[in-house]
C-alpha cells in the first residue's frame, strides 16, 4: 500500500540543522533543497550536507530538489545525492521531455553502479513556466513511458506567475486554469493526482486554509509546504474527515447488500448512490487506511 502524499515540506540543503529537522516534522515527505533556497556560492558544498541528512533517522520520505536541468549544477546534484537513502528527486522547471529522459538515463546509470533497483528512486517534476504548462501532455506521456520513475507532477506558482507576468494574490483566481490543467492532464495520462503549489504568505493562515480547500476541490492530492506550521493544516485538508470516512463505509456496505439483490442504484441517507458514487467512497476509505498505516508506523 503506497504512503500518502499530502505534504512535501522544503528545507534549505545548506542549513544542516534544518535539513535534518525537516525529516521528522510530520510531513509525508521532506524536500531538501539545492535550488532556490541555496545561494549559488553554496550549492556545491550543500550536496554533502544533504547526503548526510538523508542518512540520519527520519519519519518521512526523503526527497531532494536539484537545480534545473539547464544549469551547470544539475548533473552534479544528481550524482551527489542518488543513494539507497533517497526516495525521490524533485526536478524543477521541467519544459522538455528530453530533459526528463536525460535525468532518467543518468539516474539509471547511478542506480546500476550502486546496485540499486532500476527506477526505484522516483522523480517528481515541477511545472513552473508557460512552456512547461503548454507541453504538459507531451511531458506526462514521456513520464509514463519511464516505467514508474514519475508517479506524479507538482505545480509551482511562484515562477509560473513570474514567467507570465501574473499578479498572485490571496484569492489565487489567476491560478485556476493552470491548476485545472495539472489535474486534468495527470488523470488523462494515468498518473497520480498532482501536488499543489507552495503558499508564500506565511502570516495569512486563514487564506492558506482556503487555498488548501480549493486544491482538494480541484483534485490535487497534496501540497508543497515551506514552513512547518503549514504541515498540519495541509495534512488535515488532504485527509478525509472522520464523518466522511464513516459515511463512505455505510455507502459501500449498503450498496454491496443492494447489488447482491440485483440493484445498482439506491439511496443512502438521502444521497443517490450508483457505481461512480461507490467508487468515490472506496477511494475515501483507501486513503484513510493509507493515512492510518502511516500514523501507526
Image (cartoon, grey):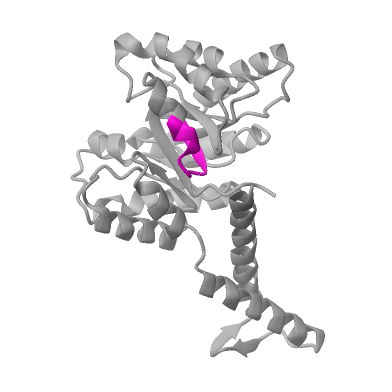
> Does the image show residue 87?
yes
Q: Position of residue 137 (x, y in %)?
A: 50, 42
Q: Position of residue 89 (x, y in %)?
A: 52, 28
Q: Position of residue 48 (x, y in %)?
A: 48, 12
Rendered view: 29 above or below 74? below
Q: Position of residue 20 (x, y in %)?
A: 46, 27
Left/right of residue 137 with respect to residue 165 in the rendered view: right
Question: From which residue to which does the magenta span run?
Answer: 21-31
Q: How many marks?
A: 0
> Does the image show residue 72?
no
Quadrant of the rendered structure where residue 250 is?
A: bottom right
* 56 is within the stretch colored magenta: no
Left/right of residue 243 with respect to residue 11 in the rendered view: right
* 30 is within the stretch colored magenta: yes
Rendered view: 108 above or below 160? above
Rendered view: 252 above or below 96? below
Name the residue located 55 percent from the left edge and 21 percent from the top edge: 103
Name the residue located 79 percent from the left edge and 88 percent from the top edge: 262
Name the residue located 24 percent from the left edge and 45 percent from the top edge: 202
Q: Nearer the viewer, residue 107 or 94?
A: 107
Name the residue located 58 percent from the left edge and 78 percent from the top edge: 247
Q: Nearer the viewer, residue 40 or 204?
A: 204
Amino acid at each position: 500500500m503506497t504512503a500518502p502524499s499530502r505534504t512535501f515540506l522544503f528545507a534549505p540543503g545548506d542549513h544542516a540543522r534544518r535539513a535534518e529537522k525537516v525529516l521528522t516534522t510530520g510531513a509525508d515527505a521532506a524536500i531538501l533543497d539545492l535550488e532556490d533556497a541555496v545561494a549559488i556560492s553554496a550549492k556545491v558544498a550543500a550536496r554533502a550536507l544533504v547526503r548526510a541528512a538523508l542518512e540520519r533517522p527520519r519519519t518521512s520520505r526523503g526527497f531532494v530538489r536539484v537545480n534545473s536541468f539547464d544549469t551547470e549544477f544539475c548533473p552534479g546534484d544528481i550524482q551527489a545525492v542518488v543513494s539507497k537513502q533517497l526516495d525521490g528527486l524533485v526536478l524543477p522547471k521541467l519544459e522538455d521531455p528530453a530533459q526528463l529522459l536525460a535525468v532518467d538515463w543518468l539516474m539509471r546509470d547511478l542506480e546500476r553502479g550502486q546496485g540499486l533497483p532500476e527506477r526505484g528512486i522516483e522523480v517528481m517534476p515541477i511545472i513552473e513556466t508557460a512552456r512547461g504548462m503548454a507541453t504538459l501532455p507531451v511531458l506526462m506521456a514521456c513520464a509514463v513511458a519511464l516505467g514508474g520513475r514519475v508517479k506524479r507532477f507538482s505545480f509551482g506558482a511562484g515562477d509560473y506567475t513570474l514567467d507570465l507576468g501574473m499578479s498572485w494574490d490571496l484569492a489565487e483566481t489567476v491560478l485556476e486554469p493552470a491548476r485545472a490543467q495539472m489535474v486534468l492532464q495527470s488523470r488523462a495520462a494515468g498518473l497520480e493526482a498532482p501536488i499543489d503549489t507552495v503558499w508564500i504568505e506565511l502570516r495569512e493562515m486563514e487564506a492558506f486554509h482556503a487555498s488548501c480547500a480549493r486544491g482538494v476541490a480541484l483534485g490535487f492530492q497534496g501540497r508543497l509546504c515551506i514552513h512547518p506550521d503549514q504541515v498540519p493544516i495541509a495534512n488535515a485538508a488532504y485527509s478525509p474527515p472522520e464523518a466522511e470516512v464513516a459515511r463512505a463505509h455505510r455507502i459501500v456496505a449498503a450498496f454491496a447488500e443492494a447489488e447482491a439483490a440485483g440493484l445498482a442504484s439506491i439511496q443512502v441517507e438521502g444521497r443517490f448512490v450508483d457505481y461512480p458514487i461507490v467508487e468515490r467512497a472506496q477511494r475515501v476509505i483507501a486513503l484513510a487506511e493509507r493515512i492510518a498505516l502511516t500514523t501507526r508506523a
